[in-house]
Amino acid sequence: MSKPSVLIIGGGVFGTSTAYHLSLRGYDNVTVVDRFDAPSKDSAGTDLNKIIRTDYPNPLYAKLGLQAMSVWEDARSLFSGLYRETGWIMGAHDLSRAWLQSALETARKTNKQGVRYMSADELKAKWPALTGDFPDWTNLYSPAAGWVPSGQALLRMATAAQENGVKYIVGDAGHIRDLWYDTDGSCRGAVASNGEIHQADLVVVAAGANLPALVHGASSDVAARTSAICVIQLENHEVDKYRDIPIIDDFEQGILFPPDENGLIKICSARLVSNYKNHGVSGASVLHSVGDNPYDGCPKELEDEMRQFVREAIPELADRPFVTTRLCWDGMATDLNFRICPYPETKNLFIATAGSNHGFKFLPIIGQYVADMLEGKLGPEWQDLWKWKHGKIPANFQDAYPWPVRDLSELTGWRGRNAPGSGKLPWTWSRL
């Protein structure tokens, strides 16, 4: 019996993983449409690096994290050699200490070793390069965590999907403007900016931060949010000094990564920003495209806040010039759970997105779950976790990054603030 044709809108983490895993299951008519070729420069995953960890208050995500970690660590996997285990310091203040405690309790229940609170003096004794005072920080250390060069990983998987027969359509023909519906209201495909209509038996929207612009009503559950990314360049003689530091993730300020092979250190704001006004989609927050706006970058307010964060951890790096900055947009769900489900009351339309700033680590495996959903095999616990919720937020909801959201229109200094960066940066790799 032949498999149905599948159209996947979006070549980011969820779309790429879905395409790859469908190809492994014998689907021979899978098409990914994206404005950009891989790695798509508007994907949140097309980045210098992302955290790989299994620490979650929710045991389902902890379980999923362990499954993904087994692939990242496997020397025979598609991602061989990409995972760097550095450990992860989770920093919290008044708004986020409860999340830390919940993550610690889950680690203990699952017998995860080495997760413990550390004082500022203990941090500095273990990693002498951390010279800051860490004022008012509560620090939870998890040794079995690290990072992956995410743009490289995304490109590897997209390449493997194409080698398995997945078709990629990019440029104007892949730039989707609207979904295409039959007279009975079922979704049959999508309309590209050049007028071309792409049809399929099953339509999967994996559009991340642009989901509310494509699917009517999706803003009830998903809104675009950005983390501002700033990159500094170490001198050659400095790389060894910082090479072995852990990821430092202050849930109320920012994230600082160890240097990569080019001596680049990424600093990422933990204070999210929405985008309700710089576009024509009424009542929704959607992405501010890197492709359309390559010279836009970090708002001045966030830069000042991130420099203060770095000053508290590694003060000698706090005032370094930035090589480049970028707004990294993701689809954030109201409850921070992914949306992997049929879209309500619409035949043939499926959602697989809303990474909610923690989706990348599941790149190796999340497509298996999307494929299970399409085949009607997704377990009930996952169906409940990832169903469309019509804006409802559970009573026990915990936000790891709880700083109040500001809108891009309220901030200053981000328009045309910097050069888009060199070829060392994954969002410059797309040929389009």
Image (spheres, rainbow, N blue to C red):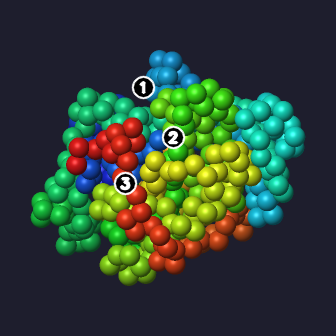
Q: Position of residue 92 (x, y in %)?
A: 77, 55
The residue at the point 53 percent across, 29 percent down is 236
Distance between mark 3 and mark 1 Cα atoms = 33 Å
Callout 2: SS: strand
* Residue 307 showing in the rendered view: yes
Q: Position of residue 179 (x, y in %)?
A: 25, 66
Q: Earlier in the sequence, mark 1 or mark 2?
A: 1
- Other-residue count near label 3 (Cα within 10 Å), few / some / many at <14 / 14–19 / ≥20: some
The residue at the point 38 percent across, 81 percent down is 282
Distance between mark 3 and mark 2 Cα atoms = 15 Å
Q: Is residue 126 above or below residue 345?
A: above
Q: Which residue is mark 1?
A: 78
Residue 103 falls left or right of residue 5: right
Residue 197 falls left or right of residue 48: left
Question: In the image as oriented, which residue stretches furthest toward the left?
Answer: 195
Q: Nearer the viewer, mark 1 or mark 2?
A: 2
Q: Amino acid at mark 3?
A: Ala
Q: Amino acid at mark 2?
A: Gln
Q: Amino acid at mark 1?
A: Leu
Give the label on residue 233, or none. Answer: 2
Q: Which residue is mark 3?
A: 419
Callout 3: SS: loop
